[in-house]
Image (spheres, rainbow, N blue to C red):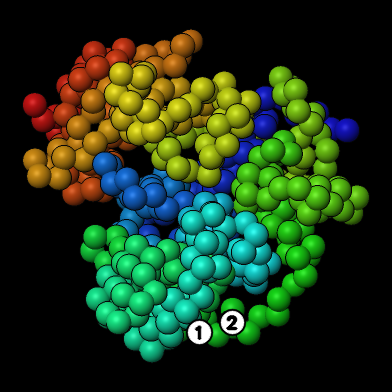
């Protein structure tokens, strides 16, 4: 059994996730986007927009400043590279994965949330009516369907607007409708699959559940580089005998190599095609919803970085603010920066910035200042505010003052 040092494991993981691919030197194109998607396969969606929406940030971390319309076009305009589905959680997912997720769509009656299953069980007429509405009128928002809700039916059967939304969620989970777009307020726009997905995807054969799950585990292993069992399960939220069987088969055929990683109590599995770079020179902020840090136990094993995001805790329990992003320097997560885009004032606010114990505060600040300036410019903001809290504040102020081209506001 091969053994990896902790440093090798970190570098394998970063390479597998595309952090070591060269940044574009000119205009970022669909080809660059495709390269990242070939690495990650999925981009998590989250409604929080305190800095930028979650699905935009992983591309920025890997490509640098890029036009977000590039991702919008790949997700919501033909020819699409991505479609929305519950692949990890709600995520933009490579269209090639649609056939591999059909078994999950077929199991919605068993695996969906109770309220969603209840609407299908108790109000099949409503579900059928909503499906017909989408097919006849799509692309269409839930509000547009709600506005057309038959009033007599509403009285007779007790349907309401919330029921329509739940029915749409059910139809989305089963794959009978898909998300065709998003409104300016980020509301979903629905349509039937044949008007959303490329024809080749629609016509692709449906693999058996066993084959699909095995391929999803293989893709997860490729995206992670080296991973413990829990991390391979988490990438596509797989569990139970179907996952265990797929893992055993991949190991038996040599598509996954059992390895030990120094400092890990859990057995790990290495993608045979994984690169093991000798060194890493990175300086970038990482989204709280980046696949690199999805599984928080993995984040601790790889980087010794205990990470919790403040948006899910009450203010008095927040240690590092509301929306703190890890700062990746070299192959280490060396700090965290709480950020907020004040779009009205045109300023990138830094409510707090903290260094991880054992790392040089001055060295972190020197690399963090241009990274913050790059984020601000990407978001169309005119400058970066001084850090309001945290042990990096003074060092950041000094580094900002000594660097040309960095506008400090406030």
| Residue 156 lies in quadrant | bottom left
Marker disc for residue 400: none
Q: Is residue 137 above or below residue 291?
A: below
Q: Position of residue 238 (x, y in %)?
A: 68, 50
Q: Quadrant of the C terminus?
A: top left
Q: Is residue 73 above or below residue 392?
A: below
Image position of 409 (left or right of 388): left
Residue at the image position 55 percent from the left and 72 percent from the top: 175
Q: Is residue 260 above or below residue 53?
A: above
**SS at mark 2?**
helix
Image position of 181 (left or right of 214): left
Q: Looking at the image, which is closer to me, 210 or 35?
A: 210
Marker disc for residue 202: 2
Q: Is residue 344 visible?
A: yes
**SS at mark 1?**
helix
Residue at the image position 23 percent from the left and 48 percent from the top: 379
Residue at the spot of label 1: 194
The answer to whether mark 2 and mark 1 are in CB contact below 8 A is yes
Q: Position of residue 272 (x, y in %)?
A: 78, 47
| Residue 209 lies in quadrant | bottom right
Q: Looking at the image, which is closer to me, 121 or 81?
A: 121
Q: Is residue 275 visible?
A: no
Q: Earlier in the sequence, mark 2 or mark 1?
A: 1
Q: Position of residue 302 (x, y in %)?
A: 61, 28
Q: Position of residue 374 (x, y in %)?
A: 28, 41
Residue at the image position 34 percent from the left and 50 percent from the top: 47
Q: Residues within 10 Å of mark 1 (few under 14, many from 20)?
A: some
Total marks shown come to 2
């Amino acid at each position: 059994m091969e053994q990896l040092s902790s440093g090798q494991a970190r570098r394998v993981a970063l390479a597998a996730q595309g952090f070591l691919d060269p940044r574009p030197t000119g205009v970022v194109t669909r080809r660059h986007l495709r390269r990242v998607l070939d690495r990650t396969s999925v981009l998590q969606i989250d409604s929080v927009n305190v800095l930028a929406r979650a699905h935009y940030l992983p591309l920025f971390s890997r490509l640098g400043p890029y036009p977000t319309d590039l991702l919008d076009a790949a997700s919501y305009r033909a020819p699409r590279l991505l479609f929305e589905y519950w692949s990890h959680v709600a995520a933009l997912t490579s269209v090639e994965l649609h056939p591999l997720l059909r078994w999950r769509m077929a199991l919605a009656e068993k695996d969906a949330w109770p309220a969603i299953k209840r609407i299908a069980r108790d109000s099949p007429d409503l579900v059928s009516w909503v499906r017909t509405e989408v097919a006849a009128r799509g692309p269409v928002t839930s509000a547009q369907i709600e506005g057309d809700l038959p009033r007599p039916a509403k009285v007779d059967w007790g349907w309401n607007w919330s029921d329509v939304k739940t029915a749409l969620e059910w139809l989305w989970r089963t794959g009978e409708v898909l998300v065709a777009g998003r409104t300016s307020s980020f509301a979903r726009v629905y349509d039937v699959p044949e008007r959303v997905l490329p024809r080749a995807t629609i016509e692709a054969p449906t693999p058996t559940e066993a084959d699909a799950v095995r391929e999803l585990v293989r893709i997860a292993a490729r995206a992670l580089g080296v991973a413990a069992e829990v991390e391979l399960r988490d990438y596509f939220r797989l569990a139970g005998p179907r996952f265990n069987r797929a893992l055993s088969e991949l190991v038996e055929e040599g598509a996954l190599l059992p390895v030990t990683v120094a400092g890990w109590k859990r057995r790990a599995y290495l993608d045979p095609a994984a690169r093991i770079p000798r060194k890493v020179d990175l300086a970038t902020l990482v989204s709280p919803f980046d696949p690199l840090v999805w599984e928080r136990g993995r984040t601790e094993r790889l980087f010794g970085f205990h990470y919790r995001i403040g948006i899910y805790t009450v203010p008095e329990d927040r240690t590092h603010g509301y929306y703190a992003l890890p700062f990746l320097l070299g192959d280490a997560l060396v700090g965290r920066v709480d950020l907020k885009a004040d779009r009205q004032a045109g300023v990138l606010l830094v409510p707090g910035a903290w260094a991880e114990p054992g790392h040089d505060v001055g060295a972190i600040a020197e690399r963090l200042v241009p990274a913050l300036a790059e984020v601000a410019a990407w978001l169309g903001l005119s400058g970066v505010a001084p850090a309001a809290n945290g042990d990096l504040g003074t060092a950041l102020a000094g580094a900002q003052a000594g660097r040309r081209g960095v506008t400090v506001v406030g």
